[in-house]
Image (cartoon, rainbow, N blue to C red):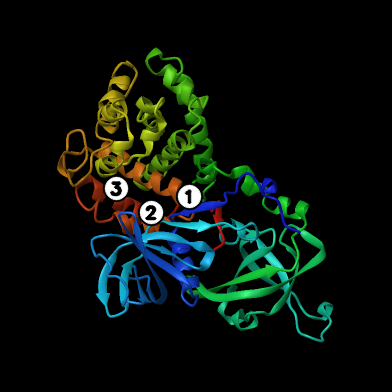
Amino acid sequence: MTDKLENLPSMFEIYRISTSPSQIADALERSKNLQQSLMWQTNGVEKTIFYFKIIELNLKNQIIIVNYNGEKELIDPNRPVFMKLHFRETLFKGKVIKFEANKLTISIPNEIHLREYRSSLRVVFGPGEESVELRVLTPGVDPSRIPTMKAYLKDVSSRGLGLLISKNNSHLFKKNQTIEVVGFSKIPLARHLVGKVVYCIKYAIEDRRILYKVGVELSSYIPKEKFEKLIKDKKNNFQTTSKHLLESKAFSKEFRDHIQTEITRTLDKMKKRPSVQGYVTSIESNINNDFYFNEHMKILIMVCAYIGQSMKWPNWASIERFVYAAYVHDAPFIEHPRLARIKNLNEFSFLKDQLSDEEKELFISSPQMAVGIAQKDPDSYEEVIEMLKYQKELSCGSGFSGKITYEQVPIQAAFFIIAHDLTDEIISNFDWSIERWLLRVKKDYSKGHFKEIIAAIVSSKEKIVAHALVSGSI
């Protein structure tokens, strides 16, 4: 019996775009030994199609090498190549780096599109968040006589499991090995589930241990009420990443309580000020119904609080300034929320043909407009005005509106620029990590006050961590 699409949980999508480095690497790894992957280039209305096979995957250098039939049409080095992998019909656009006889070296993409089949839709759990009790069955042996073992639950669908196991146990999980699922950590199963191992691959190194990812296909569906209970918290928290962040272990209970108190207190004060009252009310009522626009402000406050803590800024009143800056910095975009997603002039140059003249002018003038809103409020703060004025500047001088370099960016502004960068990382990547983000941005923030702030984050003893939400199977 096939599930109908209308029975899909609303949190799921049928086709998913992923920017997760681990998911991209996994899709490429899982496609290495599969045939019939397609590669093509478009020239006008014509497509030249090649079949290829991935023969080398180099994650360190971010490249893949593919073998293809080079006797067909020539590949244009100035055009991108489009690739469709056999694994879950993964689609991505790549750039050819090197040509050899029947071989191409192609850059690993930053974004892939994955086909979501009903049986592969999965909810992802964080490290140690959920576990599975199971047995590895032996033919001819009564299952009740076989001891159970526990494995971390990495992801789950209604008919599949992703498990994390130790290297010492990896030999037990050979392909097609039958296992019996006794229950989950908080949800016992009256009727045990039987499944087969689909794959067992090296996945990660944690605390100097090598972990293996095991994919299990169940022979029957997890009972609906059990499955719903298992993913209940994930469904309730979907698209509430500010809540996840606030619950991060980086914040003590005292600090969490203080942040919540300060947010409420500051917003109550702002709603009594005529110059900012309308903006705050519109944002709180989610008037534009835009997830990114509304949620990233809340996350930005948490990130500012975290970085402020890392820098050992003792002034509790700082949180009030963070709240004020977060709510006002994109206030000019309330009626055009899609503009809030554009990070810099480089992105703007690629997107501007899709924007109206009004939107173009609004985007370019938004920092000055945000400053104007704050300056009309007699109870605003000088530090906030600096954050708003320089919010779109970059340390290299390619930002706007002043196109200034790191020497001219005040510390409060550098602080806000970095906080917003990390906020975008968190909200756009379900398995973000500070460590991976730091590797990406360390060159951009290597001078002036930027360097000082990054150093504080690196040396912080506490690290906020991702609470993975929803993803395709990994």
Query: Can you identify the residue that label 1 sits on?
Result: 250
* Residue at 44% from the left image edge and 34% from the top image edge: 293
Of discs 3 and 2, which sits in the foreground?
3
Above or below residue 133? Residue 378 is: above
**Residue at mark 1 to residue at mark 3: CA–CA distance:** 17 Å
Q: Which residue reaches farthest front?
A: 45
Residue 276, image x, y percentages: 39, 18
Give the side of residue 464 with respect to residue 98, left or right. right
Q: Residue at x 45, y 38 (%)?
A: 292
Label 3, on which residue?
A: 453
Specify the label residue 460 is tagged with: 2
> Can you tell which quarter of the image residue 213 is in?
bottom right
Q: Earlier in the sequence, mark 3 or mark 2?
A: 3
Q: Residue at x 41, y 59 (%)?
A: 92
Q: Are marks 1 and 2 in contact (CB under 8 Å)?
A: yes
Count residues near mark 1 (Cα–Cα under 10 Å), then give few for <14, some for 14-19, many for 20+.
some
| Residue 286 spot, x, y in % from top left | 51, 27
Mark 3–mark 2 CB contact (< 8 Å): no
Marks 3 and 2 sit apart, C-alpha to C-alpha, by 11 Å
Give the amino acid at mark 3: Ile
Q: Amino acid at mark 1?
A: Ala
Q: Looking at numbered disc 2 in the image, what kind of residue is underneath it?
A: Ser
For the residue carrying disc 2, how many other residues have a C-alpha within 10 Å: few (<14), some (14-19), or many (20+)? some
Q: Residues within 10 Å of mark 3 (few under 14, many from 20)?
A: many
Nearest to the observer: residue 303 or residue 396:
396
Mark 1 or mark 2: which comes first in sequence? 1
Q: Nearer the viewer, residue 337 or 14?
A: 14
